[in-house]
Image (cartoon, rainbow, N blue to C red):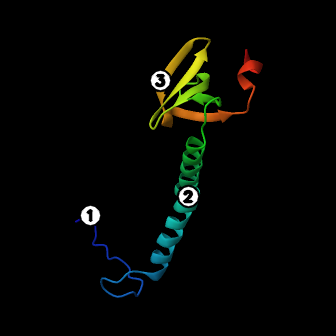
Amino acid sequence: MIISEAYAQTTGSGPGGMDPSFLVMMVVMFGLVYFMSIRPQMKRAKEHKLMLESLKTGDEVIVLNGVLGKIVKIGDAYIDVEIAPNTQVHVQKSAVQTLLPKGTIKSVN
C-alpha cells in the first residue's frame, strides 16, 4: 500500500489517562471566559435592575427604541411615558434603557 501505518505517540499519562496540563489549560480557559464575558454581563444586568427599581414619576428616560420621554405613571410591569405634550405611550418597565439627568429633554428640543 501507499500509506503506511501511523502510530500515535503517547505522553506517558497511561492508557485512558488525561494529561494534567490539559486540565489546567481548560480551567484557565473557563476562567478567562467567565471574567471576560459572563461576569460583566451579570454586572450590567444587576445595574439595569437597580435602575428600574429606582424609577419614579417625573424621571426622563430613553426607551429601547430610542424614544425620549418623561415618566407620567408607574405600574408593576408597565409605565406611561409622555413623549410629546398630551401624547403618552404605555411601555414595559424593562424597555427603559437609560435614565437621563433632569432637563435633558429640554436641551434636546
Q: Residues within 10 Å of mark 3 (few under 14, many from 20)?
A: few
64 or 100, nearer to the observer: 100
Residue 99's image quarter? top right
Q: Who is closer to the viewer here, 73 or 23?
A: 73
Q: Is residue 52 above or below residue 23?
A: above
At 28% from the left and 65% from the top, the residue drawn is 3
Between residues 35 and 65, which one lies in front from this camera angle? 65
- Say what amino acid the circle numbered 3 marks: His
Q: Secondary structure at mark 1?
A: loop
Instruction: Provide the residue designation for mark 2.
Output: 39
Q: Is residue 31 left or right of residue 104?
A: left
Q: Earlier in the sequence, mark 3 or mark 2?
A: 2
**Is tag 1's residue or tag 3's residue first in the polypeptide sequence?**
1
Q: What is the C-alpha distance between the residues marked 1 and 3?
A: 74 Å
Q: Position of residue 23 (x, y in %)?
A: 45, 76
Residue tagged by mark 1?
2
Instruction: State the CA–CA distance, disc 3 to disc 2.
Output: 33 Å
